[in-house]
Amino acid sequence: MDSSTNSSLNTNSIQSPLSLLNNMSNLMSTKLDSTNYMIWKLQISALLDAYSVIEHLDGSIPQPMQFLTSGAGVQSVNPAFLAWKKKDKAILTLLYSTLTSPVLAMVIGLSTSQEVWNTLKERFTSTARANVLNLKLELQSIRKGNESMNSYLQRIKTARDKLSAVGVLIDNEELLHIILKGLPKEYAPFASAIRTRDGILSLERLFVLLQTEEQSMKEESDPLLNSALAMFVSNTNKPNTSFSNSSYGSPSYGNSSSTRGRGRNSFHRGRGGRSSNFPQQTQSTAQGKSERPTCQICWKQGHYAIDCYHRMDFAYQGKNPTTKLAAMASASNIQNTQSAESWLTDSGASDHITANANNLNPQVPYQGTEQVSVGNGQNLPIQNIGNSQLHTLSHKFQLKNVLHVPRIASNLLSVHKLCLHNNCSCHFDANKLLIQDIPTGRLFYKGLSKNGVYPIHSQLFSSAFNNTACTAQSFSSEKWQLWHSRLGHPSAKILTSLFLTLYSNFLSKDVIEHCHHCLAGKMHQLPFPISNKHVVFPFELVHADLWGPAPVVSTNAFRYYLVLVDDFTKFTWVLLKHKSDTLTFFSQFRAMVETQFSLPIKALRSDCGGEFNLKSV
């Protein structure tokens, strides 16, 4: 029996919090103050659970009776109570060691660890619960501004944790929309792409994408990288690389299976087709280091892209180029299918490019020395610069700073500039291109892909041109009603926007604001039938209604009034000083009617508001 008793004592000694108190308090890196309750609770709960004493705080282990009464009626101290009290004091000492002085003052006078635990929980969670609306508004109003992306995301996480502390859980999808809502307008294309994404995007993945987008925007804002006039800026003093199968103005492209341009062959990687028959570098080493070619995949000197080690590694990203590359989709098979009115959307182009100078207005001669470098390495001179408009059947797009490059093979539309200047987003898949308005989500344009590219077939007008075909057409209110019915009764705002684009003589007076079918379709119930019942005596039916609060206070500071109308005589009484006086004034009104007219009020009709609960009258 002595050995079993010693074994039990040793086990209790090992598991006792007293023997582990010093080490346990050293494991706490955070002391509780008025701002870090969630972090403190996370640490202390894990620590107490690890040493199997958390049940002492949550009530799983009840407090034993302090005294035991024997069969003879003699009271003695309960040994279980002494053990429980010893353990409770140890935990209480541990809790005290993790509190700051202001918080420690809150628990003065509490005798058990469970009382301290519950008091702290009630103090820091009930206060936040009373301000849950403010916490939600704080989360909804967070904006990124000029701070870093890490700081912005941390502020959102902190606000979400505050709501979690009071039992308000914000799911990941709602938090994603809050994050996108707080981004500046520069992130609008990114936010639109995330919102239209299929499937659920995890928050961890979103954080990585946001940080990557922030880094990309910082690089684009570099003045050395963000030329406002050309996609790939090269100095005219740099020597041009000569190719055996192409001339300066008419590049030739091969159809080898190793082609890396945009086309119909396999192993395509870049834009701007190129034959695999590149000549080997034959320049003498005496020409200097500046004559060495630059790879367009890894951006290292000394070899061409076709000889690059990473040419077949499609997962390789490479480093950012020192200047922007103009991606020119001008393979010969594409050239044969595109007409002069076809414009190729290009996500690699930083500016719009056209070969027709008549598309620009005003037309300003370009005085700089910069040139446009195309996919095969050739440099094409810029002759003019100007603005224009791109008219489609459904929308008119503004094109700013269009570059006139006479030797360009195809007209290029910069996706970035198109989205930036028209506040829209572009969505690509294997078969089609969609251009949508960002604020409203309205579809601006829908086109099909062709030969691996996304052309926009339209008529390009310069800013000085007028749409004479639309000008010649007339407009009237009858035509408005006709198209309003044909298009399925859209709103006046939508039709007005459409007709302002198509008809130059459209006037606001032609708008028909009210359509009988629209009004009937929006009615959620039939109108009330006309009542055929009529009263024959005064006060047989009295209508009552309480109105207020009034937006303007009367001279006597009254904001409510009670209206009482007799259905037979139509006589009206207006009573009431305060809303709480409704029952009092109605009792006085009923007494006045019964006294002066000797008639009872048989029926009272109201809106069933709480102020007309007349059971106590």
Image (cartoon, grey):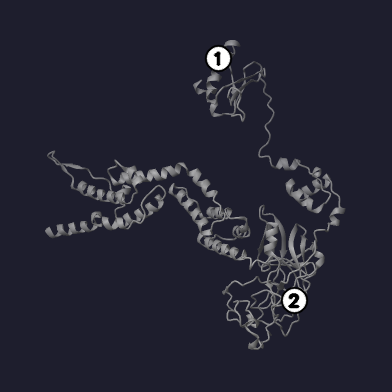
- Residue 1 visible within the image: no
Taking depth in this image into account, of 315 and 539 the one nearest to the observer is 315
Residue 605, picture quadrant: top right
- Residue 348 visible within the image: yes
State the SS at label 2.
helix
- On screen, residue 182 above or below 242: above
Classed neighbour count for the residue bearing mark 1: other residues with Cα under 10 Å, few (<14), some (14–19), many (≥20): some
- On screen, residue 176 above or below 367: above
For disc 1, the marked residue is 591
Classed neighbour count for the residue bearing mark 2: other residues with Cα under 10 Å, few (<14), some (14–19), many (≥20): few
State the SS at label 1.
helix
State which quarter of the image contains the N terminus: bottom left
Residue ID at (13%, 60%)? 3
Residue ID at (56%, 22%)? 577
Residue 271, picture quadrant: bottom right
Q: Position of residue 5 (x, y in %)?
A: 15, 57
Per the rendering, the mark at residue 518 is: none
Q: Earlier in the sequence, mark 1 or mark 2?
A: 2
> How many marks can you see?
2
Q: Label 1 vs label 2: CA separation?
A: 98 Å
Q: Position of residue 123 (x, y in %)?
A: 39, 43
Taking depth in this image into account, of 495 and 367 the one nearest to the observer is 367
Instruction: Residue type at mark 1: give it.
Output: Ala
For disc 2, the marked residue is 333
- On screen, residue 306 above or below 568: below
